[in-house]
Amino acid sequence: MKTLTRRQRHIFDFLRTHYDRFPTPPTLDELCAALGMASRGSLHKHISALIEAGLVEPSGGHKQTGIRLTRHDKAVTDQDLPFIGKIAAGKPIEALENIHYMAVPDMLKSDKPCYVLQVQGDSMVEAGIFDGDWAIIEQRSYADNGEIVVALIEHYEATLKYIEQTPDKVLLIPANAGFATMAYRPEQIEIQGVLIGQMRSYRTLLSK
Amino acid sequence: MKTLTRRQRHIFDFLRTHYDRFPTPPTLDELCAALGMASRGSLHKHISALIEAGLVEPSGGHKQTGIRLTRHDKAVTDQDLPFIGKIAAGKPIEALENIHYMAVPDMLKSDKPCYVLQVQGDSMVEAGIFDGDWAIIEQRSYADNGEIVVALIEHYEATLKYIEQTPDKVLLIPANAGFATMAYRPEQIEIQGVLIGQMRSYRTLLSK
DNA sequence: GAAAAAGAGAACAAAAAGAGAACAACAATA
DNA sequence: TATTGTTGTTCTCTTTTTGTTCTCTTTTTC
């Protein structure tokens, strides 16, 4: 693939942030204004390069209006939640380079900020959370005992476990007989969110 | 579905806020005034597009006056899947009076027609499918061995089970040591769909 | 200083949006 | 009953917006 110029890369980044903020794809004129350009034609040259690079949807003739990215990594509605990355016990959360958004039913969300992680590992299988499942997390720094939380241990490794808290210690409890419960002092643990929903695709299970 | 133009989207949003604030649906003239338009005909062109998109109720002839939105429990985008009813082993599928639609991420769907059922019972817990979970079903009359299917037994009771088929018999296999595998003749079993996705809300789990 | 990249501005075609007239179905009214 | 006004619908025509393609100039880069 032909490498992008700096300006093209810049415009692509700009497009991505635009999608996170606005529901409709921008027109060339709007992009010109936003980028401080005076000529639609010049902008279009860059867009053409992005189309050739496969980053922007080609709009066959005048069939569709607005500059839209090829990836579906934009929030189409405010119903969508950001897919942040993967969580595996014992490692930091592996953040994605390109956050994309996925439609999530209302009943799996809350009115607080939420995001989606993909679970790696088997430590919660007995709670019905399998390797490869998606977890919908409500962003929250506290939790009730018995909830399943995203916990950050020693400011480094992240894990998804049941939590039990007492004044002097915090238990992180797996749902798998093969894994051990771990005990920490409260200051070692930082709660990053609470599990409020879970999803699984059986087609991706088969393809593994 | 044809995508809305920006203006159509704007008018739809306007309608929605109007719908929330006023008891009576607006007429074309009222909408014209509110939107600062001078021509009823032009507005009507946009309304027609919204009707075609299924967002606005078609007002058959002149029978009823006012532009009214379709009920909110209809599919707003093509992302949404119909929530049909509940499935519990040993009973027919309990159909809902009012089908409503829910947003489902692309990765949990297929390009074939799909719908959503809510699972009742514990016969599949070892497959990570719990009481109250939602199942995304691809409508299909055949299945591969090892897939989880919605099977109709003797044209009456429906159930969600692993399937194993041989020329002379069909096995429906639960994922719970407390339940027994059941064997049928092929003509007793009708496959209604195949499980391709699963979802769970932990908030509804707690509220039970 | 030459080549590449970026930009300005004009011109064009198609889509989208709008204006306005005409008409039929209906409701209210005299 | 006849009339009048409102409302949804359809139509043609004009204007605006928008993507695209040019040519030419300016800026950046090596």
Image: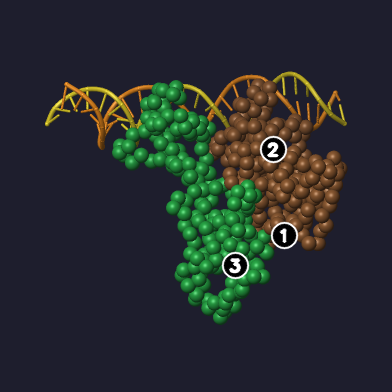
Chain colours: A brown, B green, C orange, D yellow
Kind of residue indicated by mark 2 = Leu
Label 2, label 3: how far apart the Cα atoms are: 48 Å
Residue identifier under label 3:
B161
Q: Secondary structure at mark 1?
A: helix
Q: Secondary structure at mark 2?
A: helix
Kind of residue indicated by mark 3 = Lys
Q: Is residue B22 visible?
A: yes
Q: Residue at x 72, y 39 (%)?
A: A140
Q: Up-down: is A155 above or below A26?
A: below
Tell me which chain the residue with mark 1 is part of. Answer: A
Instruction: From the top left corner, tell me how far across and down residue C21 is, in percent.
Output: 30, 24
Q: Callout 2 environment at 10 Å: few (<14), some (14 to 19), or many (20+)?
A: many
Residue identifier under label 1:
A126
* Circles 2 and 3: CB atoms closer than 8 Å: no
- Which of these two is toward me, A67 or B23? B23
Q: Quadrant of the C terminus of chain A?
A: bottom right
Instruction: From the top left corner, tell me how far across and down residue B149 is, in percent.
Output: 58, 65
Q: Nearer the viewer, mark 2 or mark 3?
A: 3
B134 on left or right of B7: right
Q: Residue at x 52, y 40 (%)?
A: B3
B76 on left or right of B204: left
Q: Residue at x 71, y 40 (%)?
A: A139
Residue identifier under label 2:
A50
Q: Up-down: is D24 above or below B127?
A: above
Dot 2 or dot 1: first in sequence order is 2
